Image: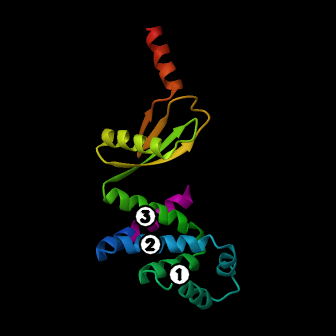
Amino acid sequence: MPRLASGRRYAQAAFGLAMEKNELDSWRVSLRKIAELSADDDLMALLENPKLPFAVKKQLLGGRLKEVNPLALNLACLLVSRSVLEIAGDISREYDHLLDAHRGIEHAEVFTALPLDEGDKQRFSTKLGKMVGREVIVDARVDPAVIGGFKARIGDMLIDGSLRNKLEVLKKSLEQ
């Protein structure tokens, strides 16, 4: 959890800078490039090497991140200096969520027993969008515990349309 919270704080700071300078999309691209770098095991081994001087690490980053926003490059250097470049993916994802929220787009995690195809995702997106009054992007996940139906989480809201929940509601109504 501390890693996600830390990623969120960096993302919020980056979002504030991007809003201030009206560079929302360039920051999105830059943060994704930094996240891609953090997935390169060979580069990460170099950047995490305590014997390598920071100036060399900064030069490596500058060479690999030529087209990114200069302030985003500074963020990458800060992450390297603090030995936390591995959270770059978390920062990028959190930034995307902040940007989508700013643009009126919600993200929903939808759990089903079987994988959803693109048509099913679109139908869920449309129905959930009508419920919350915003555009919804569906992140479909398979959960075998959901025997039938679905569960959806949009922010703090949970929609439980699972077979298990329907049986529980029926059981409670029969007991009354």
* Residue at horizontal 56 percent and vertical 55 percent from the top: 1
**Three-letter amino acid code of the residue under disc 1:** Cys
Q: Left or right of 12: which side holds 33?
A: right
Q: Is residue 60 visible?
A: yes
Q: Is residue 6 above or below residue 147?
A: below
Residue at disc 2, secondary structure:
helix
Whichever of callouts 1 and 3 sits on the residue coming sooner in the sequence is 1
Rendered residue at 58%/35% (across/down): 113
Q: How many marks?
A: 3
**Residue 77's mark?**
1
Kindly identify which residue carries mark 3.
95
Question: Circle 2 is placed at which residue position?
Answer: 29
* Amino acid carrying mark 2 in the image: Val
Counting from the top left corner in percent of width and height, residue 34 is at 53, 74
Residue at 39% over, 44% down: 125
Marks 3 and 2 close (CB-CB < 8 Å): no
**Gap between marks 3 and 2 measured at Cα:** 11 Å
**Looking at the picture, how far across and down is residue 74, in whole percent?**
47, 82
Label 3 crowding class (10 Å Cα cut-off): few <14, some 14-19, many 20+?
Answer: many
Q: Earlier in the sequence, mark 3 or mark 2?
A: 2
**Residue 12 colored magenta?**
yes
Q: Are marks 1 and 3 in contact (CB under 8 Å)?
A: no
Q: Is residue 84 visible?
A: no
Asked whether residue 164 is drawn in magenta, I would say no
Write down the region rendered in magenta: 1-14
Image-based side of 26 in relation to 61, left or right:
left
Give the mark toward the camera: 1 or 2: 2
Three-letter code, disc 3: Tyr
